[in-house]
Image (cartoon, grey):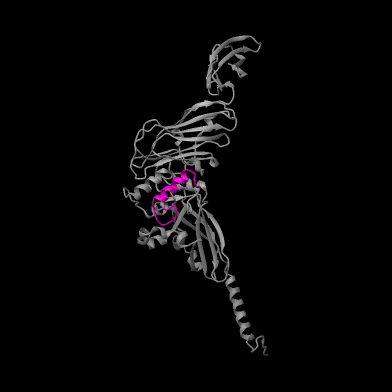
Amino acid sequence: MKTKFNFGPRGGGQIRFAALLITFILVMAYSSVSSQAIDFQGDNLFRSNGYGVTNHTVEVCIKEIDLTPTWDCDDWDVGACSGEIYEGEIEPSDIYYNSLRIYPYSDNDYSDYINGVSTADIVKLVWNRTAYEPFDSPFKFVSGDVDYDHDVDEDDEDMIGDLILSYITSFDRTSWEWFNREELEDNSTAFDSDPYDWTINELHPGGIVFEPLTYLQLANTANHGDWFDLRNTKIGDITGCTYTTINTWVCNSCYTLKGNDEVFSRSESVNLLNKDLIPSSKLSKGSTFDLLISCDFNTSLLGFQIPLTMPSEYFEVLEVIELSDKQIKYNNCNEKNEFNCLWFDKLGIANQFTPNEALFRLKVRVKKDLHNLRSLITTNKLKEIEFVDENAEVIEQKVKLSVENLKPNQFEAYIKFENQHQLEILSSSNNSIHIELFDLQGRIISRDEMDGVIGINHWDIPSNLVVGTYLIRVSMDHGVQIVRNFSH
């Protein structure tokens, strides 16, 4: 018995049906072999060295060539510093050829850009430009090209300076650039001569694609390094191994995480800020004062940065007066609660500063009542204080803050927080101050009078009081205040 299939206009239905039947049988046969996930891991190394990096992500995508129109993608997080690797798994087809796409990336936010970037990097750029110390690594040329014009020049120095000063919050390129290790090793001469063209973003926008790949090729661990081993460099971060320019994303003795992933842990230069001459005073809204920034210069310098935090909720900088002749750049950035100043020599020549030289006088108005002036002015923990000496090494130099011309907006009297045996009196005029000390029964223990001056006045509380509670009555022509004091 014969059965004919005349679906086609010329009786070709038999052939098409047979082809469909064979395809169905083949697919069913192959489907009996289950496609298993393949585990991958790769080195994720900083520049050409063996320093691993963390806090980044690699997007890994797989699809069947010509069959699957869209990529199946997963984000693989870079592991802890101790492992220096990222790892994950994919599920490629074991029947058809596969395409593999790899794209490493970072957050590219302000914290990532500024992390590790400092004045020391600008100095290295200057020395490369002036040929005093040319770059010794093609990765450094990529790092130094922050404006993404395939050149390292003064424009890059100025752009890094603008980031430190908070005129900008990012560069003209991603905060990190990545390279495929195998590609660099196969083209090492070309990479050395023209490094700008060899980043994954430059050569392979959207990710580097490997195809065609069989399941067996993907499952062979000997091949994994060709695809997954990456090199990277931080944009703007030319130097390392200094106590302030440490990049917290990099794991090594020169680039060490200090116990957690927070950016603000990268530096210890808060110890370089001397605030002893800032009073820990209460101040009312409308009070004014001058803040002086001075430095304990004791060596020749190539550059420095002084980033201060002054919360705009409490302070308004009315005027900035530059006191040095060195043309120091500065930016009073209210949006970030910062006052930043930056200096570096454009010729890469060390300059001598006057010891204890005052750099700036800031005229400041208090916008909101505050309880401790000293505690509100501090360093910016994302950037930190940095001084670069004549050898381009970061050194310790003290920055001293002091207050002059303090003019309280109103009469105020209170016990000093750090000295419970002293009364602090803020006066908005030059006037006599009358002070009376009472016990709770209303008996006068002592009377005193002092010539008050505009600003801060102090009165020592008697040290021979018996244990108990006392009241101190402070009066001036423009007000009276009662302060409770506990003697113990």
Q: Is residue 151 magenta?
A: yes
Position of residue 3 relative to residue 274, above or below, is: below
> Which of 232 and 205 lies nearest the eye of the viewer?
205
Position of residue 478 relative to residue 266, above or below, is: above
Which percent across, then down, holds residue 422?
54, 18
Which percent across, then down, holds residue 403?
49, 28
Tell me if 360 is positioned left or right of 472 in this view: left
Tell me if 217 is positioned left or right of 127 in this view: right
Which percent across, then down, holds residue 15?
61, 85
Which percent across, then down, holds residue 334?
54, 40
Q: Residue at x 40, y 60 (%)?
A: 184
Tell me if 477 is positioned left or right of 189 in this view: right
User: Residue 247: in sight, yes or no?
Assistant: no
Q: Residue at x 50, y 32 (%)?
A: 363
> Which of 226 and 473 lies nearest the eye of the viewer?
473
Position of residue 162 relative to residue 200, above or below, is: above
> Which of 419 and 344 lies nearest the eye of the viewer?
344
User: Residue 363: in sight, yes or no?
Assistant: yes
Q: Which residues are magenta?
A: 145-168
Image quarter (top left, top right, bottom left or bottom right) of the N terminus: bottom right
Q: Residue at x 53, y 22 (%)?
A: 454
Q: Is residue 107 magenta?
A: no
